[in-house]
Image (cartoon, rainbow, N blue to C red):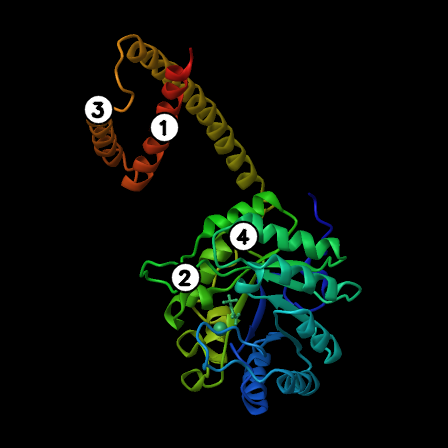
């Protein structure tokens, strides 16, 4: 489904086209904390402020946000700094309160996106408003569930839509708090190219030291924006203290000497265009060759299948497969290919080969 979407450059919030930056604390803790953080961000030219008012926490008893009174503080931030303000909504009631208090933009959190009932009630509550809505990827790596949320909102008339990629939860201990799962955002881009994508390097990384590298990766992938958690005194934060930058740290990341490099999506430069066209033509030829080789390989596999069937031999010969894989990984690494790539590639070929041979055995 092609979605009817208005680009963020037309939302009237982002003074610089790329990256569109949303910044502010994880949670609204007090009026003073919001005003101090916002005025620090304003100096960097940031125009869109974020602060969580209702916080979905994993365990009960943690700080769950101040709710409606914090919306009044956001109104005060707007009045005193001229910034636009945004917060997370997780129910229709949250939407009504946000509309009532003049919140300029809302987003759906990762846990909400995973629940189609909530997404539907939020979409219906937003119908008839002109508030931009960002949707975080669900906590599980399910691109369809993510796209379903955009479809529900778009069907209710929400056209100012964007995605926030924040990675997915993982049982395994990793460098980052979330598995970045960049492939989800890449898949979203290819399925809904008209949708702008923001990265959330704060929740993805879980620590201040990872925010810049993850933001750079997002810009390298062509994301339109960033949502970064910032707090005037991160060590005193009531939630996500380890991952919040100070406004000065965000300033350095965006405008300092070692600032993020913003990549263009295209250029009119003639020599770039000629070179890239030639290189892409080479890739197209190689891809055609790869397909035809794969097809030839599957045909041989089919012949082997028939031969095994005639001689009543089982399909799976693990010794043979192990030796192919070992030889290919060795050869691949000599050629400069990563072990993971070679392993994944040949495992996929092997799975298809086994499926092809299975079909032959099943034939009467
Ligand atoms: C947040 O942005 O404060 C938040 C709770 O993030 P997520 O939904 O990505 O966990
Ligand atoms: Mn947070």
CB contact under 8 Å: marks 3 and 4: no
Residue 163: quadrant of the picture: bottom right
Q: Nearest to the eye among marks 3 and 2: give it.
A: 3
In-front residue for pair 32/305? 305
Q: Position of residue 264 (x, y in %)?
A: 56, 52
Of the image marks 3 and 4, the number of the one nearer the N terminus: 4
Can the viewer see residue 259 in this picture?
A: no
Q: Earlier in the sequence, mark 4 or mark 1?
A: 4
Examine the rendered structure and indicate whether residue 242 appears above or below residue 316: below
Picture disc at residue 178? 2
Residue at screen point 59% across, 79% down? 53
Q: Sort mark 1 into few (<14), some (14-19) or many (20+) by Cα contacts within 10 Å.
A: some
Residue 222 placement, left or right of 91: left
Mark 4 Cα shell of 10 Å, populated few (<14), some (14-19), many (≥20): many
Which residue is label 3 attached to?
320
Earlier-in-chain disc, 3 versus 2: 2
Instruction: Mark 3: give few (<14), some (14-19) or many (20+) Cα within 10 Å.
Output: few
**Real-space CA distance between mark 2 and mark 4, rounded to the nearest whole angstrom:** 21 Å
Q: Residue under label 4, please give it.
A: 222
**For this view, does 17 lie left or right of residue 288?**
right
Q: Could you tell me how far apart the alpha carbons at marks 3 and 2 are, in whole angstroms? A: 38 Å
The secondary element bearing badge 1 is classed as helix
Q: How many residues crowd mark 2 within 10 Å: few (<14), some (14–19), many (20+)? A: many
Query: Tag 2, which secondary structure?
Result: loop
């Amino acid at each position: 489904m092609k979605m009817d979407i208005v680009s963020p450059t037309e939302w009237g919030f982002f003074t610089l086209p790329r990256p569109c930056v949303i910044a502010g604390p994880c949670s609204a803790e007090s009026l003073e904390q919001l005003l101090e953080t916002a005025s620090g961000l304003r100096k960097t030219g940031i125009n869109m402020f974020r602060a969580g008012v209702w916080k979905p926490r994993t365990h009960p008893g943690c700080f769950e946000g101040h709710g409606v009174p914090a919306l009044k503080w956001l109104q005060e931030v707007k009045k005193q700094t001229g910034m636009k303000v945004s917060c997370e909504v997780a129910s229709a009631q949250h939407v009504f309160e946000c509309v009532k208090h003049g919140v300029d933009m809302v987003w759906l959190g990762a846990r909400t996106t995973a629940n189609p009932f909530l997404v539907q009630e939020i979409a219906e509550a937003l119908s008839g408003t002109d508030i931009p809505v960002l949707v975080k990827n669900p906590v599980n790596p399910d691109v369809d569930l993510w796209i379903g949320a955009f479809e529900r909102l778009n069907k209710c008339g929400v056209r100012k839509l964007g995605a926030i990629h924040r990675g997915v939860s993982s049982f395994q201990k990793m460098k980052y708090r979330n598995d970045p799962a960049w492939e989800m955002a890449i898949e979203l881009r290819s399925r809904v190219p008209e949708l702008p994508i923001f990265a959330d390097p704060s929740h993805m990384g879980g620590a201040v030291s990872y925010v810049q590298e993850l933001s750079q990766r997002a810009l390298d992938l062509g994301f339109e924006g960033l949502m970064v958690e910032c707090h005037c005194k991160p060590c005193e934060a009531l939630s996500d203290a380890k991952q919040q930058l100070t406004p000065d740290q965000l300033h350095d990341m965006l405008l300092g000497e070692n600032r993020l490099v913003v990549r263009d999506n295209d250029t009119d430069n003639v020599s770039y265009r000629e070179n890239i066209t030639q290189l892409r033509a080479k890739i197209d030829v190689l891809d055609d060759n790869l397909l035809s080789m794969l097809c030839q390989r599957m045909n041989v596999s089919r012949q082997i299948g028939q031969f095994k069937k005639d001689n009543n031999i089982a399909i799976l010969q693990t010794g043979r497969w192990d030796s192919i894989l070992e030889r290919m990984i060795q050869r691949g690494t000599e050629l400069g290919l990563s072990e993971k790539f070679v392993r994944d590639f040949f495992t996929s070929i092997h799975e298809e080969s086994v499926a092809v041979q299975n079909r032959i055995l099943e034939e009467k």
